[in-house]
Amino acid sequence: MPELHVIDHPLITHKMTLMRKKQTCTGQFRALVQEVSMLLAYEVTRDFPLSPLPIETPLEKMTAYVLDGKKTVFVSILRAGNGILDGMLRILPSARVGHIGIYRDPKTLVAVEYYFKMPPNMESRNVIIVDPMLATGHSAIAAVDRLNETRPRSTKFVCLVASKDGVASFHENHPDVPIYTAAVDDELNEKGYIVPGLGDAGDRLYGTR
Ligand code: URA
């Protein structure tokens, strides 16, 4: 059964509302994306294994537990994925990072790859793909197709807003990849934008419009 996790904690829902508002300026929008991403990181890493580590507190020795951050690779779908990446790296600073450059052909809405760089030994790493908008699903599907060539140990997908169609089409192609999102919106418009959505996430993050 494909997994869809809608993380609708009140803090996330509140920050999503501020993010969606068209009056929210670039600086605030960027800060909100980081904050929501930090909160999503908490959920997406919930099942990550811990390893025992003998340490000494000021009072005595104990066996404590740690994550192996280096085993996690955040894969940012350029460029808007970098907004989520910045927040997630604040929670897991030792994670590795990969980048995939994919743009949507404006006429066909089909995903075209122009950049791909991953850390070595992906077979031993858990991948978390990040992209704020799961709209038609074309870029996300293409990203997982391409990443699967590197045989990662596991893959999850994180976004801020997903469309119902995007979720369905992503899971038709990749039923084994769980989706974590802060919201699911009903519709896509004729340009492939999520409505109501939050607009163009890249433009809003970087002030390019
Ligand atoms: N990309 C965006 O930035 N926004 C959308 O609504 C869809 C794709």
Image (spheres, rainbow, N blue to C red):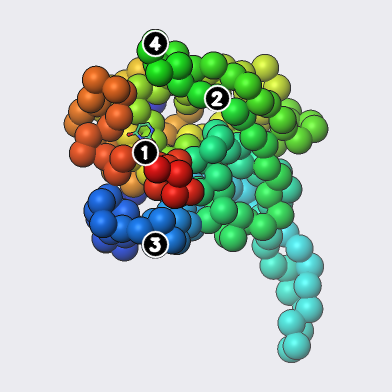
Mark drawn on residue 108: 4
Mark drawn on residue 102: 2
- Pick the front one: 15 or 48: 15
Q: Which residue is mark 3?
A: 28
| Earlier-in-chain disc, 1 versus 4 | 4
| Earlier-in-chain disc, 4 versus 3 | 3
Q: CA distance from mark 2 to mark 1?
A: 15 Å
Residue depicted at x 63% and y 21%: 114
Residue found farthest to the top: 108
Q: Is the residue marked by circle 4 packed among few (<14), some (14-19), or many (20+) residues within 10 Å?
A: few
User: SS at mark 1?
Assistant: loop
Q: Quadrant of residue 61?
A: bottom right
Q: CA distance from mark 3 to mark 1?
A: 15 Å
Residue depicted at x 55% and y 24%: 102
Residue 152 in the image, given as x and y percentages of width and height: 66, 28
For badge 2, the amino acid type reads Ile
Q: CA distance from mark 1 to mark 4?
A: 18 Å
Ligand 1 within 8 Å, label 4 CB: no
| Earlier-in-chain disc, 2 versus 1 | 2
Where is 192 relative to 181, above or below? above
